Image (spheres, rainbow, N blue to C red):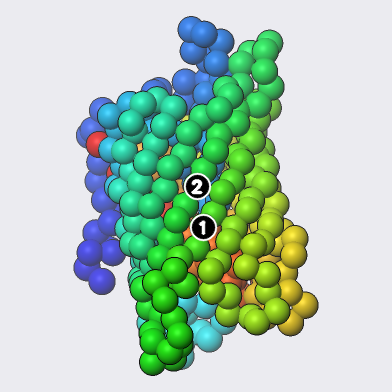
Amino acid sequence: MKFILFLLAFPLLCSGQEDLLEELDGELKADNSVRAAFKGIKIVNFESTKLLYKKDFYFVVSHRFGSVKYGFDDFFGLDQAVTRLQFLYGITDGLTVGVSRSSYQKTYGATVKYRLLQQRKDGFPFTVAGYHLIAANTAMSKDDLPKMEFKHRLSYTSQLLISRKFTENFSLQLMPTFLHENYVVVDTQDNSQFALGVGGRYKITPRWSINADYGWHLNRADASPFKNPLSIGVDLETGGHIFQMHFTNAQPMFENGFLGQATGDWGEGDIYFGFNLTRIF
């Protein structure tokens, strides 16, 4: 718990560092490319079109408390928290790779994100990136699933990320998504699934922005208890850090989890508070 409190306070203790906002906020480069549609690598749950610069190294701590629905019974979700640790590295300015581990279903993941097209002033109107995840659910047990093989632990996600920075303050993004789970919880659910995500960012001050994203699952089984993920939050930018705080109805923080297994319901107050803390090296 002390570690989490330290991470929460750490961005506010770093004002003496060289401020990276100018680098992060550079809208127009010498080649007329438009940058910084999003400051964080994630909008909230969904990946943004932002990539790391060459040789940049990011450490990302994502924390999601349990549902606030039960109030003081579990101290508004404190007793049911899950954490994801992620390490990202910029191979080039247009290619980022990463590895992660989430306490939700003890999931390990490997990711790659790459830029396909760049928005340019008086030129191509969008930034387009590809994103892929392979994840392994190591919590699955042969005691519960005697016929389970290693392949059943695996799931895959592929996304096309399409963003546009309309103004200095406002950006939107679409995320057509394909995901495949070798093992599905609901028998009638197709292993191959499709979704469409939409997200946006509105900057309200030089350091603060409001972010939101939503995932529309296109072929969810009729008998499925899972919901479409809706997330709303704010971003705070400090020297060397990006701190995101949000509410969402999905506790999992990897794509197959929040798109395929979101259980919360905003209408019933069944939502989760969380944060993403990005440390830039």
Residue at image location 50% in from the left, 63% down from the top: 155
In this view, 271 is above or below 86: below
Classify mark 1: residues with Cα within 10 Å, few (<14), some (14-19) or many (20+).
some
Whether the residues at callouts 1 and 2 have beta carbons within 8 Å, the answer is yes
Residue 245: assigned label:
none
The residue wearing badge 2 is 132
Q: Secondary structure at mark 1?
A: strand
Which badge, 1 or 2, comes first in the chain's sequence?
2
- Dot 2 amino acid type: His
User: Picture coordinates of residue 191 (x, y %)?
Assistant: 62, 68
User: Picture coordinates of residue 261 (x, y %)?
Assistant: 58, 72
The residue wearing badge 1 is 156
Residue at image location 68% in from the left, 11% down from the top: 122
Residue at image location 59% in from the left, 46% down from the top: 159
Instruction: Name the foreground residue: 238 vs 139.
Output: 139
Quarter of the C terminus within the rendering: top left
In this view, 165 is above or below 80: above
Residue at image location 67% in from the left, 42% down from the top: 174
- Dot 1 amino acid type: Tyr
Q: Secondary structure at mark 2?
A: strand
Q: Is residue 152 left or right of residue 203?
A: left
Residue furthest right as drawn: 222
Instruction: Name the foreground residue: 64 vs 252.
Output: 252
Rendering quarter of residue 169? top right
Residue furthest top as drawn: 30
Instruction: Name the foreground residue: 15 vs 103.
Output: 103
Q: Is residue 75 left or right of residue 19?
A: right
User: Picture coordinates of residue 202 (x, y %)?
Assistant: 61, 39
